[in-house]
Every structure is written in structure tokens, then in C-alpha cells.
Image: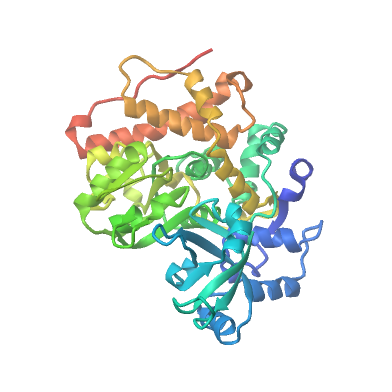
């Protein structure tokens, strides 16, 4: 399959050696950035010059503790400095001034500016989302410059987007059609840095390799489908943080700490939208350790947003498409084979509200995923994670898949609307991820759609339905609708 992968995806394939190489693991780089570097420095055989690559990293990938030295070079020595960073843009309504922030270094818009000519050159790339990854170049405008009375500021000189190529989604879709479904599962795992050959039958819990692989890939569903809300409980060491925090540059992973309505949705004092507005997905990892301020306000904001993607804070109304994922560790005694143990009591108090839980579309049985070991680390040719995360981001905007799902699924009379929407949304995400080449309902067999899309979506929603009954007697005894597939 390696030859087919390299032939079909050409430059978008890199050699990943995560079992033997400690070079990148020591740098703690996310997968998309590591593969971007590999694409720049590797030859056709997957070899790279470690000294050359290390020199590039030292020059262009500063650590947070390097920021004072950067400011010294820019402000005191009046040098221009270029480095890779995540940048966000703000346009002041009152003054029409444009500023930027570098959140990873604590640089705020009050300290920065963008000249008009720079803005005109870079705005198309900088306006791709709330945050943009790329090579930035900064300099200093001192307070004594002519006609400049507001104090010294760091100014943006240039910006080059992180993604150096244009994504051809049709090419990706057509290339997928060259692979059998079993091969494609392995391709996707490789893009996530996992070695498909490392999966083995779980004799203790009777879980075969395909089910383990599919459960792992289920974590990617919010990457490809807008407003998809999931809950996952898994044992420690199964890679939740790695997948949600390192594969894509378009999401946000929050690991414990305090979470407020201002952080999540909108800060009234700063007049700034929160995490939900600038990301494809927001993951609350180790959700049991999160502290939520103003539980009632958070419940109300979450309930409205998870229903229709609209959030209201004070007089402010915003719209976003980010999905929300709750991740937590689970005790072994609660790892029920069918997911029907009473689990949601483990969630923080803010989620002990059935109307809120009802808005989550599916549950991931993380105990079906093996604990990380060296055999599961990718060693070989695989899809470039940086390319793959861009593909998943683009797939979010493709509405044809939902049209196909609507055409294929027969909804029985009297079906609960939230159950129907949940199943269709999860099935759509599976279709995008596993069968992206499908352009009409005739392009996928009824068997493949049932096994890999519909049945899995129904089972994921069924766990949510059961847990609702544990939280609220009103939901008890209500089974899932019997969805059928139109021939």
C-alpha cells in the first residue's frame, strides 16, 4: 500500500519515524508543524539533515521564554525579526485601526499596529479565521515618529501563511477512490501518527482490530463536520490529548482549569469573542477537573449554542460553527461493553442537566482504544498531518454529504427530532471521513453506508439516550428510532 499512497498523494506524503527518532519528541511540536518541517527538509527517501533542521527551528520557532530577547532585538536594536507564530487580527470600530495579537507570547493588540499597505498585501491570508498560522515579520515604530503620538508599537511588516500550497479537495476525493476501505482506515491512522499494524485483537474485551481503529478515527469527526458535539470517556494513556491537541491547527484543547462564559463565548469587558468563535472544535479535556464559574449562566449559554450555533451574552449575539467535545478519564468498573453503565455522574455539575446533554450527538467508547505503546507509533510513509488537517478543515464546508445522507436515510414516523439530527450529523461526518469520494447516493453501497456510517451513528447516539434516562426519569425507556436506508 505504501507505493499506492506515495503515487496517489505524491508531495503530501512524508516519512514518519516516531518509534526511533527522539528529535521531534524532544521539541514537543504538534504533528501539523512537525510534518510541515519534514516536508521542507526531507529528501525523497525520508532523510533529513538534523543540524540544518535544528538551526531552522532555533531561528524561526521561538519559545515563550525567548520573547523578551525578541522584544530587545525589535525595540532596542531596531531589528526586523521573522518567526513562525499564530496571529489574530482586530479591527477597532471607533478608530478603524488594525492591530494584531500573538497570544502565545502575551502580545496584545494595544501594543501593535498594521500599516495600511501591509494590510492590503496580507489581509486575504490574515482573514482566513480568527487565528492564522504563518511566518510573521515584525519591527518597531518608536513613539517619537512624526505624526505618531500614541506611543511606541510593534508593527507587522509581512506575513506568509503557514500552508504553502492550495488545497485541491477534488484531487483528495478522487485519490481516496483508489483505496479499499480497510486500506483507507490505515491511511487515516498514519495521518494521525498511528501505526495501523500495531492494532491487535483484544482478547479480554473481544474487540477486533477494525473496531479499535474506527473508534480511534471517531475522534476526527468534529474535525470534518460543523457543530458536532461529542462526549468521550476513556482510560488514561489512550491519546485523547494527542489527537485533539496536536493533529489540527484549527481546534482548541483546554486541559482543566477554570472555564467561564467569557472565555468560552464572549467577554463583555473586552468586547471579544471566546474560544467557540475562532475554532473548528473546542475540547474540554479531563473535564472532571474543570471548574465552571456561574454554572447557571454557562448552562444557558451552552444550551442555546449547542442547539443552533448561536450564543447570547448580554446584548451581544454571535454565531459560530465549532463543535464541542467533553473528554474524561473513566474508572474500569464503568467501562460497560455496551456503554450503558451510569457514567455521566462523573461530569461536572454544569452538565448535570438533561436538556443540555440531549444536545450532544454521540458518545465515543474510549475503552475500545488500546493504551499507547511503541508498536502503535507510526514508522513509515504517511499523509502529511499538516496537509491532512487542512483537508479536514475544508471538508467542513462541503454540504453535499449531508444532502446524500438526507437522501439515504428513511426516518420513521414520530422519530425524536434531536435523535434524527444527531444520527444524520454523525453519519455525515463518517461519510466525509471514510468515503470522501462519494458525490451522489449511488456512489456508496447500502452495506458500506449502513456498517460504517448509519449503524455507528445510531449506537453513538443510543449511549447518550441511555445516559439521559439516568439523569432524568422523563427520558427513561425511550429507545432509538428504527432508521432504514432507501434502496
In the image, 406 versus 233, the foreground residue is: 406
Position of residue 453 measured from the top left corner of the image (x, y, whole percent): 51, 29
Residue plotted at (61% across, 39% down): 185
Q: Residue furthest top?
A: 487
Is the residue 113 above or below the residue 405 in the image?
A: below
Is the residue 259 above or below the residue 428 in the image?
A: below
In the image, 82 versus 98, the foreground residue is: 98
In the rendered image, which quarter contains the N terminus?
Answer: top right
Is the residue 473 above or below the residue 349 in the image?
A: above
Position of residue 345 measured from the top left corner of the image (x, y, whole percent): 25, 47
Confirm whether residue 334 shows in the render.
yes
Q: Residue furthest bottom?
A: 76
Is the residue 159 above or below the residue 392 in the image?
A: below
In the displayed structure, does residue 316 sit left or right of residue 385?
left
Residue plotted at (29% across, 55% down): 261
In the rendered image, which quarter contains the C terminus?
Answer: top right
**Image mark count:** 0
Position of residue 118 measured from the top left corner of the image (x, y, whole percent): 61, 63
In the displayed structure, does residue 445 sit left or right of residue 366?
right
Image quadrant where residue 120 sits: bottom right
Q: Residue furthest left?
A: 473
Confirm whether residue 343 shows in the render.
no
In the displayed structure, does residue 416 sit left or right of residue 133?
left
In the image, 291 versus 318, the foreground residue is: 318
Position of residue 221 measured from the top left corner of the image (x, y, whole percent): 49, 41
Residue plotted at (46% across, 67% down): 103
Amino acid at each position: 500500500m505504501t507505493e499506492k499512497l506515495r503515487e496517489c498523494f505524491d508531495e503530501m506524503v512524508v516519512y514518519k519515524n516516531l518509534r526511533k527518532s527522539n528529535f521531534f519528541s524532544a521539541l514537543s511540536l504538534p504533528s501539523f508543524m512537525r510534518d510541515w518541517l519534514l516536508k521542507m527538509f526531507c529528501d525523497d527517501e525520508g532523510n533529513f539533515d538534523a543540524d540544518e533542521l535544528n538551526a531552522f527551528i532555533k531561528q524561526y520557532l521561538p519559545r515563550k521564554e525567548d520573547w523578551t530577547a525578541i522584544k530587545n532585538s525589535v525595540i532596542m536594536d531596531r531589528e526586523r525579526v521573522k518567526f513562525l507564530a499564530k496571529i489574530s487580527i482586530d479591527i477597532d470600530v471607533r478608530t478603524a485601526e488594525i492591530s494584531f495579537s500573538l497570544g502565545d507570547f502575551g502580545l496584545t493588540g494595544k501594543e501593535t499596529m498594521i500599516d495600511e499597505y501591509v494590510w492590503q498585501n496580507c489581509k486575504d491570508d490574515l482573514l482566513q479565521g480568527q487565528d492564522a498560522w504563518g511566518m510573521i515579520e515584525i519591527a518597531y515604530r518608536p513613539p517619537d515618529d512624526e505624526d505618531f503620538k500614541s506611543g511606541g508599537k510593534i508593527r507587522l511588516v509581512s506575513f506568509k501563511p503557514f500552508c504553502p500550497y492550495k488545497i485541491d479537495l477534488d484531487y483528495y476525493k478522487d485519490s481516496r477512490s483508489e483505496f479499499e476501505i480497510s486500506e483507507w482506515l490505515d491511511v487515516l491512522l498514519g495521518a494521525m501518527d498511528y501505526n495501523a499494524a500495531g492494532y491487535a485483537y483484544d482478547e479480554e474485551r473481544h474487540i477486533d482490530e477494525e473496531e479499535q481503529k474506527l473508534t480511534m478515527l471517531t475522534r476526527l469527526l468534529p474535525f470534518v463536520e460543523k457543530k458536532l458535539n461529542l462526549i468521550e470517556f476513556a482510560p488514561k494513556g489512550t491519546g485523547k490529548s494527542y489527537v485533539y491537541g496536536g493533529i489540527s491547527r484549527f481546534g482548541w484543547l483546554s486541559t482543566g482549569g477554570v472555564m467561564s462564559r467569557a472565555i468560552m463565548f464572549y467577554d463583555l469587558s473586552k468586547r471579544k469573542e471566546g474560544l467557540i468563535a475562532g475554532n473548528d472544535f473546542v475540547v474540554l479535556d479531563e473535564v472532571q477537573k474543570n471548574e465552571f464559574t456561574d454554572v447557571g449562566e454557562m448552562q444557558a449559554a451552552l444550551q442555546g449554542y449547542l442547539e443552533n450555533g448561536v450564543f447570547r451574552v448580554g446584548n451581544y449575539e454571535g454565531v459560530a460553527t465549532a463543535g464541542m467535545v467533553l473528554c474524561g478519564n473513566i474508572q474500569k468498573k464503568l467501562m460497560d461493553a455496551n456503554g450503558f453503565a451510569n457514567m455521566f455522574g462523573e461530569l461536572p455539575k454544569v452538565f448535570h442537566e438533561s436538556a443540555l446533554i440531549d444536545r450532544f450527538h454521540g458518545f465515543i467508547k474510549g475503552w475500545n482504544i488500546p493504551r499507547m505503546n511503541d508498536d502503535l507509533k507510526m514508522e513509515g510513509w504517511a499523509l502529511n498531518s499538516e496537509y491532512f488537517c487542512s483537508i479536514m478543515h475544508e471538508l467542513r464546508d462541503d454540504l453535499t454529504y449531508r444532502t446524500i445522507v438526507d437522501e439515504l436515510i428513511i426516518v420513521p414516523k414520530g422519530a425524536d427530532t434531536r435523535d434524527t439530527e444527531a444520527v444524520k450529523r454523525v453519519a455525515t461526518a463518517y461519510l466525509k471521513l471514510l468515503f470522501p469520494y462519494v458525490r451522489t447516493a449511488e456512489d456508496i453501497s447500502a452495506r458500506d453506508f449502513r456498517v460504517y456510517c448509519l449503524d455507528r451513528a445510531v449506537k453513538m447516539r443510543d449511549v447518550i439516550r441511555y445516559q439521559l434516562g439516568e439523569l432524568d426519569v422523563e427520558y427513561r425507556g425511550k429507545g432509538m428510532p428504527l432508521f432504514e436506508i432507501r434502496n
